[in-house]
Amino acid sequence: MVSAFRRGKLAHQFRIYDTNGDGVLERSDLLRVADALAGARGYEPGSAAYESLAAHYEALWAPLQRRAGGALRARVTLEAYLAWHEEVLADVAHYEKTLGAMAGLVFDLFDEDGDGIVHLAEYEQFAKATGVPGTPASWFPRLDLDGDGRLTRDEVRALIEEFYFSDDPHAPGNWFFGAP
């Protein structure tokens, strides 16, 4: 069972993904996130990088669509979104195949210059493209686990995992998608 605290974090994430703010997720919402990220990285529609990014968001949409009844024009409510996450987070292997796999993609999107490090400017660009509210510079120090001013692939993975699994209100991963 996902705690009320974790449900609150997931509701925050849901609102970020609900790009048109209508209170439900649709395929078009997730594709707008993918388009914004692709635009931030300069990926041209039809390019391999663009198609790979869109495919990841399509893969995220498919189980949500099934959770919403499988209709072609499914609309996923917050409750359905939370129920799907509860199912995924109850099984570590399921998490690794879905949300855990997205952690690597997220890092690669952050690391614009390919140096293996995510700097504040790169994180800010990602946050802006995905609609994360607030000022990333104000919470980036919370995410920087070792205080060196940058995030490694392992740190990003740990933060995302902490976002999904931690019930500690002081855990740095709570801030991954902006102020909880």
Image: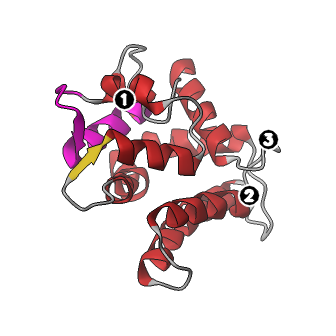
Asked if residue 160 lies in the magenta stretch, the reply is yes
Query: Which residue is rendered at x = 51% and y = 66% of the image?
Result: 38
Q: Secondary structure at mark 2?
A: loop
Q: Position of residue 119 (x, y in %)?
A: 29, 43
Between the C-alphas of marks 2 and 1, the distance is 30 Å
Q: Position of residue 75 (x, y in %)?
A: 78, 55
Q: Amino acid at mark 1?
A: Phe
The reply, left or right, for residue 76 in relation to residue 30 is right
Q: Amino acid at mark 2?
A: Glu
Mark closer to the chain start, 2 or 1:
2
Q: Nearer the viewer, residue 41 or 1?
A: 41
Report how many numbered discs are placed on residues in the image.
Answer: 3
The 10 Å Cα crowd at callout 2, few under 14, some 14 to 19, many 20 or more, is many
The range drawn in magenta is: 145-164
Mark closer to the chain start, 3 or 1:
3
The quadrant in which residue 164 appears is: top left
Res. 129 in view: yes
Residue, disc 1: 140
Residue 26 tag number: 2
Between the C-alphas of marks 3 and 2, the distance is 10 Å
Q: Secondary structure at mark 1?
A: helix
The 10 Å Cα crowd at callout 3, few under 14, some 14 to 19, many 20 or more, is some
Question: Is 26 situated above or below 47?
Answer: above
